[in-house]
Image (spheres, rainbow, N blue to C red):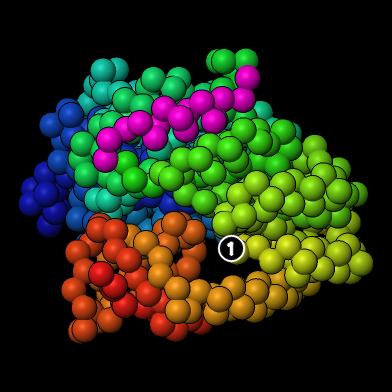
Amino acid sequence: MRTKYSKKNKINVVTLGCSKNIYDSEVLMGQLKANGKNVVHEDENDDGNIVVINTCGFIGKAKEESINTILHFVDKKENGDVDKVFVTGCLSERYKPDLEKEISNVDQYFGTHDLPNLLKALEADYKHELVGERLTTTPKHYAYLKIAEGCDRPCSFCAIPLMRGGHISTPIEEIVIEATKLAEKGIKELILIAQDLTYYGLDIYKKRALADLLKELVKVDGIEWIRLHYAFPSGFPLDVLDVMKEEPKICNYLDIPLQHINTELLKSMKRGTSSEKTIKLINQFRDRVPKMAIRTTLIVGYPGETEAKFEELKQFVIDSKFERMGCFAYSHEENTAAFDLEDDVPEEVKEARVAALMEIQAQISFDLNQEKVGKTFQCIFDRKEGDHYIGRTEFDSPDVDNEVIVDATQHYIKIGEFINIKITEATDFDLYGEPVS
């Protein structure tokens, strides 16, 4: 017996990949809700007779996860548990003809700019007046805020421009409207996202306008923290550092993927910078905002990364002592500039290099965390897990950074509240503490 009669036209939106995809799913869900549709996000029971999968197509592992998810719901459709399956997002944008051929039982594929057409397939109308209206899927006290779409950078390893198109900034006034609506719903922390925050404004204001945007966002009542994700080192607007230092609402935190430090590899990657310029930029960050936590991401195993070049990268990590760092193995992506190069670093070597860097970073993080023991930090608490409350300092972003853990059997903390926590113990990636008055 088909299940559609017990859950008629319930739309289950499944999101894969990065925070930009989460944002896009929230916009889709906001539109569906405004059309009177019954919509849920990643229902744990897969309870929905219509499924929309928002895919990621960035690197090999992400693509594999997206394909496996599509196949999972296609199987459910074959078994009569699902009526319709729609696929959208980056993988669909990049490989639509191949997907239509290989997984033909999907009802329809849509790209990253096909929201009106996707809504039409879901028997909904695109409502232009819904500026800033989203059905947020994050905890009620923080939200992602996308300030631009696409990317104009020519990075040789990256397929994002193929999937997202060129950079398009959202006007400041529209972003402020959206931030205000989020604040009215109880959001206290905004996490600004884009493929490249530092390019913001060049297309519509003919200058880098991230600092101007921040000066307007800090005026929004109810917003307490504003966090910056995905900056780019080349052409970084240093006036952003002045705003960060002067405005208490701007977290002393910056996510700036550097990818590598070897000048020859940076040139091949088309990053528009060098080892010397990168180190100078990091020193400027430290000098102008001494309390800043820097999060970066590095690539290992890029074509031509010899042992000597990797050793240079290792030493850079040791010397820089980044507060937060992630690392991933290079993925050889078709239709990128680097695809013409020989993928000459074996997979096992790539993975060993990832492990080596993360081991170094674990020790750095442990040492930095030990310095926090005995000190008090303002923290916001995201959730309760078992007998523990899980929170963050201003130096930590959700899901990717350190967490502050408080014993729930000894203390009561309201989720979404700012609490002063004295750190009593620290490991490499976790802090333990207790509330102080």
State which quadrant residue 320 falls in.
bottom right
Residue 76 on image: x %, y %: 29, 57
**Residue 10 visible in the snapshot:** yes
For the image shown, how many numbered marks are present on the structure? Answer: 1
Instruction: Kindly state the secondary structure of the residue where label 1 is placed.
Output: strand
Residue at coordinates 58% horizontally, 38% vertically from top-left? 242
> Which corner quadrant holds the C terminus?
bottom left
Q: Residues within 10 Å of mark 1 (few under 14, many from 20)?
A: many
Q: Quadrant of the N terminus?
A: bottom left
272 with respect to 389 (left or right): right
The residue positioned 29% from the left and 64% from the top of the image is 419
Q: Position of residue 162 (x, y in %)?
A: 62, 33
Nearest the eye: 31 or 68: 31
Q: Which picture quadrant has residue 323?
A: bottom right
The reply, left or right, for residue 280 in relation to residue 405 is right
Residue bounds of the magenta highlight: 207-222
The residue drawn where x is 53% and y is 52% is 253
> 250 or 205: nearer the eye?
250
Q: Is residue 388 above or below residue 121?
A: below
Left or right: where 125 falls relative to 159 = left
Task: Look at the image and tell me whether residue 122 can be seen.
Answer: no
* Percent coordinates x, y for residue 409 in the rendering: 20, 84
Q: Residue at x 32, y 32 (%)?
A: 220
Which one is in front, 7 or 97? 7
Can you give x and y, in whole percent of width and height, for residue 348 in the image? 75, 73
Pointer 1: what residue? 324
Amino acid at the residue labelled 1: Arg
